Each structure stands twice: as C-alpha cells, then as structure tokens.
Amino acid sequence: MNTLHDLRTTLGREAAGFDDTERHGRAAAVHQRVRVARRRRATAAAAAAAVVLVAAVATGGVLLGGSGLVEPAGPVTDVAVPEQVEVNGFPYELDEVRQVAPGEDVSVGTGEDVAVMLLATGLGDGSATLSTGDVALARVLAGQERSAPVTGPHGLAYVSGDLDDAPDGAQIGVAVYRPTDELANGFSYDTVVFPSDIGDRKVLNAAFIQGGESSASVVIRGRLDDFAFADYCSTTQPDLTINVEVDGEFFGSTQCQEFMTASRNAASGGWSQPAGGPGRHVVRAYLTRGDGGGEVALEPGTLAGIGAYRWTARRDVIGQPVPETVEWGGRRWMLEDVVDQAAPGQPVETTVDTDSGDRLLGYVTRGGVDVWWNGGLVGRARDSFPATGSTTYDRLAGVLLAGDSYEVTATPTDANGRAALLIYRPV
C-alpha cells in the first residue's frame, strides 16, 4: 500500500462489505427516476404545451399569484440538469437528483468533495435558498429552475433548502455531483494537483515529498513579493504538521488534513505570502509531529507538497495586496468595489443590493475586525478575524445571495484599527 489511491481503494472495498441491502436499490431508483424524467420530458413536451393552451382557452384564464402568472408546479426531479459540470477546473459527474422538503437536512456525503445544485419549480414570485448549517450557498429566483453548482467552505455533509414567498405546490430539490478521477490541469501527483491557476495566481513550480523523505523544495527567481506559496498535507497519521521556510527562515505551518475528506486541490491548504526583493529563492516544505518537534519522514498514508504561484493582478488595500480574481464556493469572482473607512478605528458601513446577482463579501484588516451582514431573506451572519499588531490580512467571508439587500458593517476591534470591505461579483 504505497499511495493514497491504494488506501482509498482498500477502504472503499471494506465499506462495500457492510450489509446495507437498500443502498444499491436506492441508487438504482434515483438514477432510474432521472432517466424516466428525461424520457418523459423529451416525448411529452409538445403534448404538454398543447394541453396547457387548450386549458387556458377553455377556462378563459390562468392561475394568478402576486403580480405574475403562476403555472402549476411540475415535479422538481423533472428539471433538466447536466450529466457533468466543471468546478474550478475539476470535472464532476451527476450522482443523484432528489426532491427535499423545506427545512429538511439532506445528507450529501461525509464532508467530502461534492458539488450541489439547487432545483426549484413553481416559485411564482418567491425564491428558494440552499444552505449548509448557517452558511447560505445558493438561491433560485422567480423564473429560474436551478442554481450554479456550489461547494462548501470545507466540504459538504448536509444541505437544506427553504422557500420564501412561494405559493402552495412549489417544490425544491438538489442535484448532487461527485468528482471524477480526472484532475484539473497543473502539477499533479497521485490523487491531488496544484492547479495551473487559482484566481490571479499562476503556478510556476511544485514539488511533493517522496516516501522516506521529510521535505521537498522549489526554486524560484524574482521578487518574493510577486509570489505566493501553497502547502498541502493530507494524512492518516495524528498530529502531523507541514512547515514552510523561505531561504532557510521559518515562515509558517499548517496542521495536516484528514486524508479521507481532504481536497484534491493541493492549493486549498495554507498559503504563505512572504516579502522580499529579487533574486534566487528556495522554498522548502517539511513535516514535523506536534509543536516544535524535529523533522519526520513521510510514511504511507500521507501526501504532502509545496507549490509556487506568481501573482498576475492585485490591488493595494490598506497596504495589503488583494487579488482581483478569487475562487470561492466552486465559482470565480472578480473584485467590483472596495469600501474603505473614513478614519482609523471607525466602522465601515455599506449597503449591497444583489438584484443583479450574487456577490461575494471579503475584507481587509489591520488590528482585528468583526464583520456583520444582514439580509432580508437569510437574516444576520458574522465573520471575525482576531488579528493584533501591525500585520495586514485579507479574508473572504461569505456569499451575499441574489434578490436581496444587505446591510454590511465592519467594526475594528482596536482603537486605531484599519478595515475595508471587498465586494466581488461572479465572473
């Protein structure tokens, strides 16, 4: 057993040995329902249109709801969905389509890498919202039937759907997509890859720690300020840490992930953004166990490496370079607006209307900040960053879903703290 692929395969065989006599029946029923729904749509579309026209003429009218016309809700499992989608360069295949009750928690996995599409029919003038816990993920508005495929901040285990101002008979559902064995373009090894680009960052070089070794290094040439470094580590071993040093100086460390729920995107772990001038630089990633322990060799069941990325576009906000393009929730976003504070220590306040579509909220802070956003449909949400000192950080907070208006406030936690809000739109 030399690779994570071998280990996953072995665990998969063991899981298949458990006695779950209904599992295959459930899966077959789901896929059969999808196939039947597609055949029914293909053969009945013309007939359905004719029946609707005749019914309208015969009754002299249509059902009204709010200010618009409302057709009777068709089965949400009839909504046309693609067999395969691409999420940030990674291909996913349709696994199942199911109807869900409003407010029902639906299991979509065990926290692993899945993508989910929200489906809805018969909304009238209302809307449907998909969430995981307190985190809103996607929304379907009047006149729509499905959302873009989305992922969770740290994988997805459960999702739920809710209706707002929808008439009786409205239905919601989910289409669940699971990753294929294919990887995105980039520097790959075993089952993971440092993708060729992450927003405004383009990969230049990457290296993975080999069995029996404790470290791996990449060499770059140029100004350190123009680079960012992604470290990756997934493992079955306890208390394992990946550390990064630049030109022999320690820069930071990240706890290794549980490999069964770790992302295939090797650039999804920790990021280092050193400062420095031009020249030749060596970036080394190495493994330790616990805090302050010595280096340990990589053993079976662990996959670790380091990737070097060059920035292609950034904007300076409070002295911090922030990306013009980012990835979040399975989508790409472009910086649309920066809202700065009037003076140090003062809160930053703004209203974000999302009539034209979703927006992604981020912020920059020096000295710590509490960020709140309050929407009419999803209520109040919060994110905070307890930074101290003179270091400036940037962070993404969450999606402001379409069809709403949000009051957003960023309050510095230090008397002279600095803060700014970042608003991104979908690409």
Image (spheres, rainbow, N blue to C red):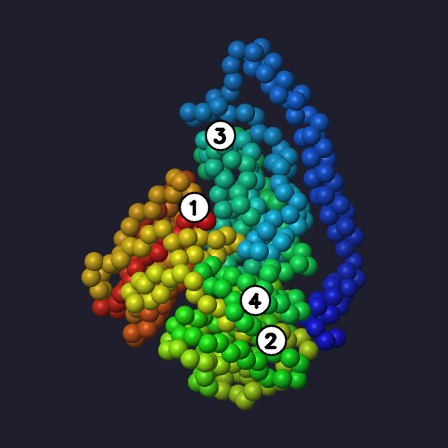
Residue type beneath disc 4: Phe
Residue type beneath disc 1: Asp
Residue type beneath disc 3: Gly
Gap between marks 1 and 2, in whole Å? 37 Å
Q: Residue at x 53, y 43 (%)?
A: 147
* Horizontal relation, residue 139 to residue 371: left or right: right
Whether tag 4 and tag 3 are in contact, CB under 8 A, the answer is: no
Q: Residue 233 location in percent, x, y?
A: 57, 73
Q: Which residue is mark 2?
A: 208
Q: Earlier in the sequence, mark 2 or mark 4?
A: 4
Q: Secondary structure at mark 2?
A: strand
Gap between marks 1 and 4, in whole Å? 28 Å
Q: Is residue 262 visible?
A: no
Q: Which residue is mark 3?
A: 124
Q: Which residue is mark 1?
A: 358
Nearest to the eye among marks 1 and 2: give it: 2
Q: Residue at x 32, y 63 (%)?
A: 316
Q: Is residue 138 visible?
A: yes
Q: Earlier in the sequence, mark 1 or mark 2?
A: 2
Q: Secondary structure at mark 4?
A: strand
Q: Residue at x 72, y 38 (%)?
A: 35
Q: Residue 25 location in percent, x, y?
A: 77, 47
Q: Earlier in the sequence, mark 1 or mark 4?
A: 4
* Horizontal relation, residue 207 to residue 333: left or right: right
Q: Residue 19 location in percent, x, y?
A: 79, 58
Q: Which residue is mark 4?
A: 194
Q: Earlier in the sequence, mark 4 or mark 3?
A: 3
Q: Residues within 10 Å of mark 1 (few under 14, many from 20)?
A: many
